[in-house]
Amino acid sequence: MTGILNRCVRGAALCFVILAGAAIANTAMAEADANVTATFYEFLEERFEAELQRSPIALMQEGRRERLDEWDDFSDQSTFEQRDISTAELAEMRARFPFDQLTRPAQISYRIFEYQAETRIANAAYYRHGYPVSQMFLFPLGVNSMLGRLHPVTTNEEAEAYVTRLEGLEGLFGQIAWNITDRTEFGVIPPSFLYPQVIEGLEGMLAVSTEETVEQHPLYMAFVGKLDAAEFGDEDKAQLLTVTRNAITGPVARGYQAIIDAAAAAAPLATTDDGVWRHPDGDEYYAHMVRFMTNSDVTPEEVHQFGLAEVERIEGQMQSIMDEVDFEGSLSEFRTFLMTDPQFDYPNTDEGREQFLGEARAATQRVMDAAPAYFNRLPQAGLEVRRVEPFREASAPRAFYNRPTPDGATPGIFWANLQNMDVWSTFDMETLVFHEAAPGHHFQIALQQEMEGMPSFQSNYFSFAYVEGWGLYAERLAHEMGLFSSPYTEFGRLNAELWRAVRLVLDTGIHYRHWDEAQAIEYMTAHTTMGDDVALSEVRRYMTTPGQALSYKMGMTEILNLRTRAQEALGDDFDIRDFHDVVVGNGAMPMPVLEEVVNDYITANLAE
């Protein structure tokens, strides 16, 4: 499998950590032209700024107060324009900046820009294959959170821009409705469960978009909160809320209705053949998504076989845990024991919630105490464990991580939704903390954010395979660090890795081997602790986001393969701290450039 994962398309990221790689860096510098490198970095900053200016949403996410009254263009024409821009920028970069005249860090920047442009060009070839809406990604509902969190309202101009944005949603939602109709005519129709769910969600928004109910609309309530926080005068506030009412009951409501109408027209054409294989060029599209999500040229069949082998391997390790705790019975019976025995429950009380928070905080502290033996650099930003506030528990996921602010005013936060403690078990809590917080996403994201001198486009780069691969690797690393508190929590770690291996089988089973929903659910429930309802939700996620579920396990596997390569090459000179600095101390990157950076690290150490 190592050979499969190493045959990857090009990617890149910036290597800012100077370890024993100084020797190879000095060789590159000797041939480099400082002026060419400086001009190249100017080129990258100019292109990043131009890209931001094409996206009012991205500007808002960056905290910029520009174009606050506008939305992005969701039309097909915008996709073509971005493809053409990427084509032109790629050609310009190759013509203006000879690769061998750049410093080594600049060469890595070159690679990531090249990878990003080539990926956009390749993705554009399948612009009609993605579903415009799904139960996972329904932009009209995401707008509520986006504007509530990110749109500033501190001046009259910003408040008026908020209203203008609401008025503009009719056009934006109209583009989504047109995309649904166009994809339907093309033959790209989601599984039969999807459109009813989309329609139900939007009808819920329509229900609070009338004159009688508008004050219950999230966009209205968020605006009221912003005006109150900014201490707007009563007269100005009343005037702004009047036009907000009109925007929600008029343009916004009409936008919802347009999507509902398009979805309702497409719904009767949907089938229960759930894989993308049934679409025009569906097999080619899925093969592309596998490459895109794994950053490799691995095939669907290879992924499927690897997944089957990993499920068998991990279940063998689970049997060892069962032997350790003297459990007599099958693996299925042990799973049932874990899910039903009260000793693994958190009481659904305030005392149970405090118990959870205390144990989660203790787990993060164990990481911090042990981390210096595994990392040379630790995040300077703090890490806190917090309960999701009651007012947003109903819509929040079970757990998630928020990055710290660059100024350090806000720490990294591991949020736990403790509304219903029945969804938590003591045997799997630690695994989630180690993945989402430390040494997982907090170490990876906070360290990237604290790097100085990184080109802006790289600071914003994201790779599913790298980010989620590191999160899953962090679970394994926590085991190696001796951080799990009992054999049962060790089983929870194996159960989490097994879930990611099962995903390899299911995603390829659905989209490559033509599995139906019942087959997929049967496989998942046979190999995980998930009940039918949770398994159904998970399987439907894979149906509507082909390839994405592969990134976790495939990314982790590549990190482990590269670590093994470094250990075998360096022998007694291998230092896990240096390896982690190379992997997580250089920002998010596609997996191929991670291989490139690790190879540099190995070569430099061998040259000493």
Image (cartoon, helix red, strand yellow):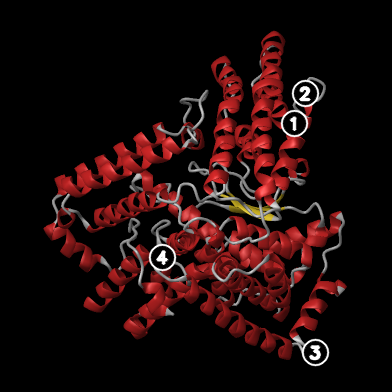
**First in residue order: circle 2 vs circle 4:** 2
Q: Nearer the viewer, residue 435 or 174?
A: 174
Residue for badge 2 = 210
Q: Badge 3: few (under 14), some or many (20 or more) residues near its Cα, within 10 Å?
A: few
Amino acid bearing label 4? Val
Q: From the image, which quarter does the N terminus lie in?
A: bottom left
User: Who comes first in sequence, dot 3 or dot 2?
Assistant: 2
**Residue 268: x, y in percent?**
69, 47
First along the sequence among labels 1 and 3: 1
Tell me the crowding category of disc 2: few under 14, some 14 to 19, or many 20 or more residues within 10 angstroms, Cα based: some
Q: Earlier in the sequence, mark 3 or mark 4?
A: 3
341 vs 461, left or right, is: right
Residue at x-position 23% and y-position 46%: 91
How far across and how far down the image is residue 535, in percent? 72, 65
* Position in image of residue 338 (x %, y %): 79, 76
Q: Amino acid at mark 1?
A: Leu
**Residue marked by disc 1:** 206
In the visual, does 101 lie left or right of 506? left
